[in-house]
Image (tube, rainbow, N blue to C red):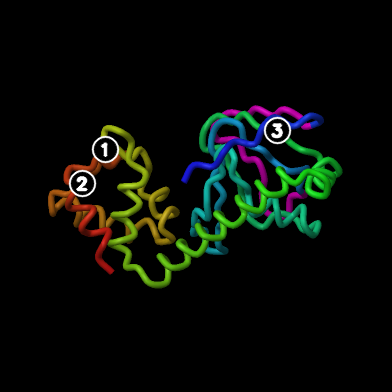
Amino acid sequence: MTARPIPSIAGARPMTCPAGTVLFRPMDECPGFVSVQEGTIRVSLTGPGGREIVLYRVRPGEVCLQTFACLADGRTYTAEGVAETDIVAEIVPVPLYEKLMAEDPAFRTHISSAIAHRFADFEHLVENLALTGLESRLASALLRLADGDGDVLMTHEALAAEIGSAREVVSRQLARFAKSGLIDSARGRVRIVSRAGLEQKSREA
């Protein structure tokens, strides 16, 4: 489901940044509510051993749970947010955000709905990590991340972060997919050869 973008808010500060910009890191304070107008922000956690997992992405109309939590109780960020594409956004200062939440029913309803959808995404993430095998998770990720030509332009390390695994494990599984004729793998790119075959793998526990 695609969220409706939040209309431009009077009093918000415009923000633009190129792909690759780190927008926040663990222990950073929150400058205000981020309303994405164009582009995608990737939010991820990195463990002590360096393993990364992608928690979610923030697109126009969607809410960053990390930012929402910071605004709700004054905590600092616990994850990292990176501009996955060029970003056009607005920063709503904390006092204005609090005023909108208190006095603007339409804004409050939009935020509540976006939070509900985000929690549903988290439930799906936890279910996948706890109950779904790596082969199925990787097949699903490839199908989800492929462009119109069937190419996934990501490194093995980035794919591992998408499914909460290690790069070496993902590399071995990709090699098995390639041997089965499901994909063609090259440096920084995976091309889907058999979408039907990957779809079957994605449905297996």
Q: Earlier in the sequence, mark 1 or mark 2?
A: 1
Residue type at mark 2 is: Arg
Q: On the rendered structure, is 87 left or right of 102?
A: left
Kindly identify which residue carries mark 2.
195
108 or 53, which lies in front? Answer: 108
Q: Which mark is residue 150?
A: 1
User: From this viewpoint, is residue 188 visible?
Assistant: no
Residue drawn where x is 77% and y is 32% of the image: 12
Which quadrant: the C terminus? Answer: bottom left
Q: Which mark is residue 138?
A: none
Residue drawn where x is 44% and y is 60% of the image: 164
Asked if marks 1 and 3 touch (Cβ < 8 Å), the reply is: no
In the rendered image, the vertical position of residue 64 relative to residue 123, given as above or below:
above
Location of residue 8 by image quarter: top right
Asked if marks 1 and 2 touch (Cβ < 8 Å), the reply is: yes
49 or 32, which lies in front? Answer: 32
Residue type at mark 1 is: Gly
Kindly identify which residue carries mark 3.
90
Q: Earlier in the sequence, mark 3 or mark 2?
A: 3
Q: Which residues are magenta?
A: 12-29
Q: Position of residue 176 (x, y in %)?
A: 19, 57
Q: CA distance from mark 1 to mark 3?
A: 33 Å
113 or 41, which lies in front? Answer: 113
Residue drawn where x is 64% and y is 36% of the image: 6
